[in-house]
Image (cartoon, rainbow, N blue to C red):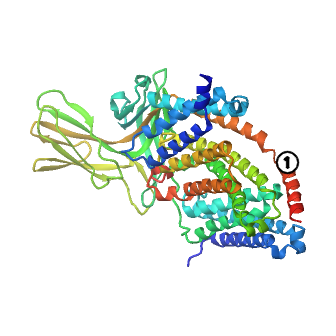
Amino acid sequence: MQLWLRRLASLKFTLVGMLLLGAGAAVSYGNPVDVSVWVLIVPLALLALNLSAAIVTNPGINRQPGLLLFHVCLLSTVVLAGVGRLTHLDAHLEIAEGQAFSPALLLEVQKGPWHMGDLDKVAFTQGHYTVDYEPQLKRGLTHSTVYLPAPDGSLTPRDVGDDRPLVLERYRFYTTHNKGFSPILTWIPDQGQAVTGRINMPSYPLFDYKQDNRWTPPGTQQEIQFWLQLDSGLDVEKSWVLDGRNSSAVLVVTVGDRREELQKGQEVSLPHGRLRYENLTTWMGYRVFYDPTIQWLFFVTVAGVLGLAHYFWQKLNLQAWMDEAETSSVDNHGASA
Amino acid sequence: MNVVAEQPWLWAGLGSYLVATLVAMWGVSPKHADSALVAGKRHEKVVLGFMLLAVALLSVAIAARWLRIGHGPWISLFELLMSQMWSLGLIFSFLYWRLPGLRPSAVIVLPVMWILGSWVLTLEPGISHFPATYYNSWKWIHVGIGKIFLALMLTGVGLGGVLILRTTERGRVWFRAMPADAVIDKLAWRLMMLALVFDSLMLIAGAVWAQDAWGRYWAWDALETSAFLTWLLLAIGLHVRLSYKVPPWVSGAIIIGVFIMAFSTYFGTPYLSPSAHKGVV
């Protein structure tokens, strides 16, 4: 068993594992979709086995506290990264101004089989936002206001955006470049209850030229086309702030051959009911990230590097090197003379 | 040609590096071995003086650009090269001062600086856009540690180059004042060990920044993969040296190989890859 472990701990095996990992990383360069993740997992698993065996059997590692700490932390990093993938959640969210977060709003959800987050406990309501732009639409800072419920029932505003995510129940919500306008509409059917909702238009200003969408009222088969004629103050030659509160729009409603332009508060009669354009609001796109291991990963990797630094510090001893160099240099001269 | 505020200072800095390079080369040449300046190693003080002058002039160039465009040298290749010439010069000057044994290797290190210097002269000093994700303070830690890592690698390249050149008669003459190969090899790899510590810290700081900036700490994008391969290559180099008895010139070649990978990670991948890693989205 001991012999077997020593063979598994061989430095030559380490080199093979590292070369395989390097090859795997090289073919994964730029994240091509047709390369399997196994090109990284297999060499990492081999290296983890090799490292575990080396920690147990190699006195060069397990009798040097700094080096031992580094290698244990390296192994722990691989394990934590694996646990992170098994428990992670990645998703996108499009949430409109005034809308409360609900897990049902998440889009393109990818999660590990062991994901056990308390997404149901996440509660916030989206407020307004502003995005600064330099000339030629170069995006600057995003300030998105979200409202968090306080124990007394009131709502507390918080400013998030860019590298300042909203972190709730370990879920991290990052603003993205994906955001836009969202007209609020009320559909009053000839028979039945009126319903109020919103239609998210395509990302703005990315799709400034096609602010349109379609909707079919419930109980009908008549599709309504919407087009937003926006006045957001956008001038690509100048600095500009995207702010829904300073924007207005005419809503163009098209049903078949009929075309109507609606100002805020106006309504139009359609074959099965009436449609009222209530207000113009905005929506914000968030990237949602959950990984319970990230703090642990940080501490473990830093501890590992400290271990490595401790080990190398003992080896460095530059003064000793200078003395050695001095002697050696004298010897060299002596030899050549 | 429209000359912007930082350019005269940049040119003066490059001129100062050029003088340092020429004096260093003059100092290793056997023709001048009997000169009082070389025999008393006073030319080394001249080299150090001009390197420090270059660093001072580049500091002014960076400050002038900062004032002109409103942000530090973080974004364009022009800015990065200028900033790296500053930090590489500063850290190499420190090591040159503290480790007299490596001083003749400046004839290898300074021409590498000149590759950067020649490159920066071909680039437009246009105004770059400062992305929102660059306001993050982890950027300072990531970039600062990365500068130390690259400077240690560059110093290692100087020593590695000496080990390779000493396989020739001319190389043995040029670097006659340096310690024996075994001693140089030992110092070179100790610098590589230190480089591994700083490279690891740079990756950790970069991962924290990436988590804040793009909502993920690691995504195997082109720059991350390239940075990981550099780290792995350095670790492979250290393990090769532990596992096998490698001749000094092979040892030097490994160090130079790792440096080439690091160099392409710094100055190639971010400007060739369409990935959003730069944050300019």
Image spot of residue B165 (x, y percent): 71, 64
Q: Residue at x 85, y 72 (%)?
A: B33
Looking at the rendered image, the quarter that the C terminus of chain A falls into is bottom right
Q: Nearer the viewer, residue B197 or A67?
A: A67
Image spot of residue B155 (x, y percent): 71, 56
Q: Quadrant of residue B59?
A: bottom right
- Other-residue count near label 1 (Cα within 10 Å), few / some / many at <14 / 14–19 / ≥20: few
Outermost residue to the top: A152
Image spot of residue A173 (x, y percent): 45, 35
Outermost residue to the bottom: B1
Regarding residue B26, the answer to whether it shows in the image is yes
- Relative side of A86 to B156, left or right: left
- Relative side of B62 to A87, left or right: right
Label 1 sits on residue: A319
Looking at numbered disc 1 in the image, what kind of residue is underneath it?
Gln
The chain under label 1 reads A
Q: Nearer the viewer, residue B72 or A81?
A: A81
Q: Does A284 sit above or below residue A241?
A: above
Q: Nearer the viewer, residue A25 or B272?
A: A25
Secondary structure of residue under mark 1: helix
Image spot of residue A21 (x, y percent): 51, 42
